[in-house]
Image (cartoon, grey):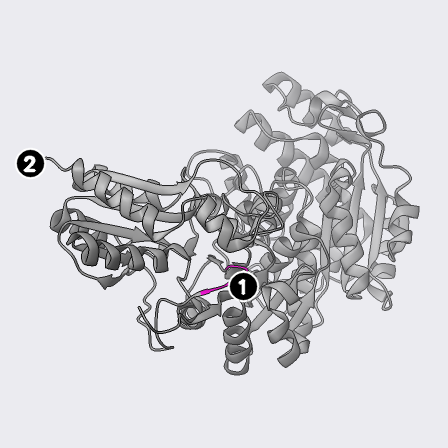
Amino acid sequence: MTTEQEIASTRVAYGQALAEIGYTNPNIIVLDADLAKSTQTILFGKEHPDRFFYVGISEQNMMSMAAGLAANGKTVFASTFAVFATGRAFDQVRVGISWPNLNVKIVASHGGISVGEDGASAQSIEDYALMASLPSFTVVIPADAYAVKKAIPLVAEAKGPFYVRTHRPATPVVYSSDDCPFEIGKANMLRDGTDATIIAVGILVHEAVAAAEMLQEEEGISCRVLDMHTLKPMDVDAVISAAQDTGAIVTAEDHQVQGGLGSGVARILAENYPVPVEYLALDGYGTSGPYLELMTHFDFTPEAIREKVKNVIARKVG
Amino acid sequence: MLTDNVTVKNLEAVAKQVRRNIVRMLTKSQSGHPGGSLSAVELLVALYFSVLKYDPDNPEWPDRDRFILSKGHATPVLYSVLAESGYFPADELMTFRQLGSRLQGHVDRDSTPGVEMSGGSLGMGLSFGLGVALAARFDAKDFNVFVMMGDGECEEGQVWEAAMAAAHFNLNRVTAIIDHNKIQNDGYVKDIMNVAPLAPKWSAFGWHTIEINGHRFDEILDAYDEAMKTEDRPSVIIAHTVKGKSISFMENNPDYHGKAPTAEQAEQAIREIDES
């Protein structure tokens, strides 16, 4: 690739999208727990100050207040860091939002190890396993800023609770414009192939595409790449087709290995069409360091995905 | 519908019936929480029979006053009062906690007409009530929001997050009611984790505090009136009550926080309620 890679921030895209739909949807209320300058809900707050509330550093209170607002007809966006939104207030989300199936959209920034220097306590590596375990939740992890802009208006219109993860750093874009395809529950095939399929979410989608290009150019291996932006409900047909058409699957995600994308894919395959699977994910906590150095340190690279693909192809039967 | 001119005598008769219902439904279900239900009877009867505006035929009426049971295990008293208020037939109380019943063990807004919040985990109701009051502000509605908590529940940190936020947002339509029966699951509140003194704590958090005997209807009605007339701050009513009130072997006995009476005990309990 000779052109310079465009990078853009998923959390800024969230703030911009939210501020925009605030003009057409007067029913939206936004709550933030003293991190609006980071989650970028501040962009909504500046445009719609009457519908934006700081609840202070009290995530439990924020989630139960969101439930009260939603139970009385409001569509509530509640934002803070992913670790706090999902871990600190899990019981409030479980009992108050998920069980009664309320219209609360938890959009959390700083997902995964890409948080960088703040280190393990701030790096949310269990967030979407927790949220996906809640029966009524839909879980969305857009791959880039363009996908966020497409996703947020759809999330606002959809019924029921959502969890959406954004990231701290500006990250390489996968799509080229706001016209990128985005349908909740439907994976995007970014590249077709015959030898294996790489299924990725979030910031690993870009690395998956790069790995597929590398494999094609350097080794003549043909990979399909799926952006599984909706982790739950997962696009079952896309996973089964990938298994049938390519016979081997690699999953890639910035999250710990249990309860994430890999587990979800494996469950679908085990029930429908078992093929070999390799997982690129975390198995332990993160650490402090610059984001790009951490990406290398934790093998979130095209090269690491390439090795997983070669391994999984070697395991194919016949 | 505002029920006017209901005499204290009438309220006392309703309270007796509510207590009988509580004993009968728990005896049938052989599980549930009698102590903290019996302590809250007068507080809820006064609210539903003399204060709240609601329409049992239209539980979703947007202008209704809201009652939120944060101590979500005290469903026996709430269901009994809702039945007596016309939300559903009193016979249905006998399905409490059974498979397929609308009367779930803990409050469930999707199952039970008249129940505003799904809960059961302590400490969440006041925050929920703030969200409701905030929604009312947006919709230019002036209904009241009452939230009942336990005294043991005040050990939950979230209660104080919400206490701070209520004053910060000046949600003056919110009234917290604390059923201060001095007993929690494992024993006396003062021994498990002392929450006293409650009034200075709430006052320091910016609330108008009212302290009453939670079994005297005259004091309860005055307290609700004072709370609703207080415009500059949210109000909290600290109601001193007796856990297991009106049943001798349950009164002030931590064992009956979450234990149902036997059939024999139930007979004695009903007798004592009748004679009280």
- The quadrant in which the N terminus of chain B is found is bottom right
Residue B206 image offset from top left, x and y in percent = 88, 58
Q: What is the magenta range?
A: A167-171
> Foreground: A265 or A110?
A110
Mark 1 falls within which chain?
B
Q: Which circle marks residue A241 in the picture? A: none
Any part of residue B85 in sight: yes
Q: Which circle marks residue A318 in the picture? A: 2
Marks 2 and 1, how far apart at CA = 66 Å
Residue B259 image offset from top left, x and y in percent = 64, 23
- The quadrant in which the C terminus of chain B is found is top right
In the rendered view, does A161 fall on the left or right side of B48?
left
In the rendered view, does B217 fall on the left or right side of A36?
right
Q: Which circle marks residue B58 in the picture? A: 1
Q: Quadrant of residue B90?
A: top right
Check disc 2: other Cα within 10 Å, few if <14, some if 14-19, many if 20+. few
- Per the image, label 1 sits on a secondary structure element best described as loop
Q: Are marks 2 and 1 on the same chain?
A: no
Q: Nearer the viewer, mark 2 or mark 1?
A: 2
Residue B126 image offset from top left, x and y in percent = 71, 52
State the residue at coordinates (68%, 77%). A50
